[in-house]
Amino acid sequence: MKKFSKITSILLTAGLIINSFSGVAKGVGVTQVKQVQLSSSMSALSTKESLEEGKIISGFKLESKQWIDDVHSTAMIFNHVKSGAKLIYLQNEDENKVFSISFRTPVNDNTGVNHIIEHSVLCGSKEYPVKDPFLIMTKQSLNTFINAFTGADFTMYPVSSKNEKDFDNLMGVYLDAVFYPNISKDPRILKQEGWHYEINSETGELNYNGVVYNEMKGNYSSPQVILSNTINQSLFNDNSYSYESGGNPENIPDLTYEKFIETYKKYYVPSNSSIYLYGKLNIENTLKFMNDNYLSKLPKTNVDTAIKLQKPYERRVEKTGLYPVAKDGSTENMTYLSSNYVIDKISDVEDVLVFQILQAILLNTEGSPLKKALMESGIGTNAYGSFNLSTLQPVFSIITDNANESEKYKFKKVIEDTLKEVVKEGFNKELVNSVLTAIEFSLRTQNSNANRGLNYMFNAINCMNYGMSPTEYLEITPALNKIKSKINEGYFEKLIQKYLLDNKYSSLVILKPSSGLNEKKEEALKNKLSAYKASLSESELAKIKKDTEELKRWQGTEDTKENLSKIPTLSRSDLSLKAEEIPTIEKLERGIKILSHPIFTDGITYSNLYFDSSKVPQDKVLYLKLLANVLGNVNTEKYDIMQLSNKIMRDTGGISF
Ligand SMILES: [Zn+2]
């Protein structure tokens, strides 16, 4: 059905700062060379007088305004006085505009109520009373992104578009969806998106059905999802992170219509929202639209959605979980082992950056000491780390897969011994420097990435959700420089001692394969449902059958033409006839033709070298492919393969052939 995805905790941080450390460039035939001098071609935008700090524009008070070099934008932080909504606008010349509205939505059970609300509000609203405005907008708008996410403690509705009218349309549909959804008018929405009983004949089998119910059943087969949940359960036994925000299929049917509506009403209020705007847009008009149509009409409510801090544990805990594998399937070498540490003190971007760097140094490269030690110990086939910022108290994890449960103490010992040795001997400076370069590089490529507006959004909303300044994670260079100045003082080594070696607030998680687990669960479900069916009176059963038919009929009914016409569309006059122009300068140097594109790349030079292969005979063309695979993977005149690989990683973002 819908293209919704639920953010798992590990994914959320992907947008943050570091994307990958691959030493090889993505994309075929692209050579990326790092330029030393940083471009400053983009200067602060001229800003109108009305946009001065302290001024109120359409009910929004401009609290602060500052240029942020790292994101090449003027960041304006607004507060909607009447409703209490918070808003950040990143003003810049990017045509790919972004809007999102997020709500803080902590959970206190496993029914997946926030996830079901996320789906349900997009099933028709006051202005757009059709069954699936979301699906229609995915098809009939020029969106460059449209989706909705449920995180561990927030729910987010982002859209982006390069067309101004389209952007306004999308924003309108989303604001109407979150503030005036049809969910309380039509109980069928919960049944469809959440769960319902289904029976096709009185003698047939009684079943559960529902979009989120089915989605989470699929999710619960993924060991990565179960591992992430088990890690959270091991570390946060008293607060909302011990629950699964997406919903556990076993508990989703516990959700009542009353609880569903009550949760929506509690969380979906402006004072509990964070709005994000990005790109080249008419901010005055946008603020006016939000104020006049939505925020000025909604009351200010004082809802307490603060997330309770988990009291740190006094001793390390161990937790075992199970994930399903096929009946009669092998379970040999299929266990996940994970050592997890709560980093209880994150107050600014430097703290976040430091742990991301530490994770990279310890685990992300082939020369990383912890990765090397774990691989050489023979435990599992893959060792990696994660630094998860999607909980109020972030978690640092060291994970190995394809291992055995019996190796858990060896796993623990290898980690301890390696970390102790690193603290004693200090890190290899070459490794630290190449990781720092890679981080800086990935930061700059992110700034010239087509989706940068969305990347910044996750960073800004993450901060707003935890009561920090929305710009805290957007200014990275000063923090990175501070870290660089401290690396020779044993900075990382001290952090390892304090937060990994001496940290009692930690856990060892063992996730074991269980053959036939799904089959066992299915069997138990079948028994539960048939016992329930047996307990029903004839008329109760007839009612379920009638409801099933009625829901199917409703789902099969087309929306009326009148209602469909309410969904905004673009006309030809809304489209620009001008194609996007990429400036090209052509010149000849030493007989070589050079084409250059003077566009914003945040100081990174991308260069492609093309060689004429028209003289290669047809039957030798395949050897060109072989040559491209060989280059970069063999010794050269000046360097052996290791030196070459280090040099490529240190001085470039990657070279490919
Ligand atoms: Zn979903």
Image (tube, rainbow, N blue to C red):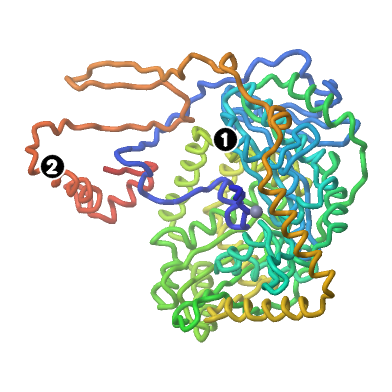
Q: Is residue 115 visible?
A: no
- Residue 553, how many percent across, how many down? 70, 51
Amino acid type at mark 2: Val
> So how many labels did they put on this image?
2
Pick the front one: 410 or 57: 57
Identify the residue position indicated by label 2 in the image.
621
Amino acid type at mark 1: Lys
Q: Residue at x 77, y 40 (%)?
A: 178
Q: Is mark 2 within 8 Å of ligand 1?
A: no
- Residue 337, how many percent across, how many down? 54, 75
Identify the residue position indicated by label 1 in the image.
139
Pick the front one: 254 or 34: 254
Pick the front one: 347 or 187: 187
Q: Secondary structure at mark 1?
A: helix
Task: Give the quadrant of residue 474.
Answer: top right
Real-space Cα separation, disc 2 to disc 1, in angstroms? 42 Å
Task: Tell me if 147 is positioned left or right of 49 in this view.
Answer: left
Indicate which disc residue 41 carries. none
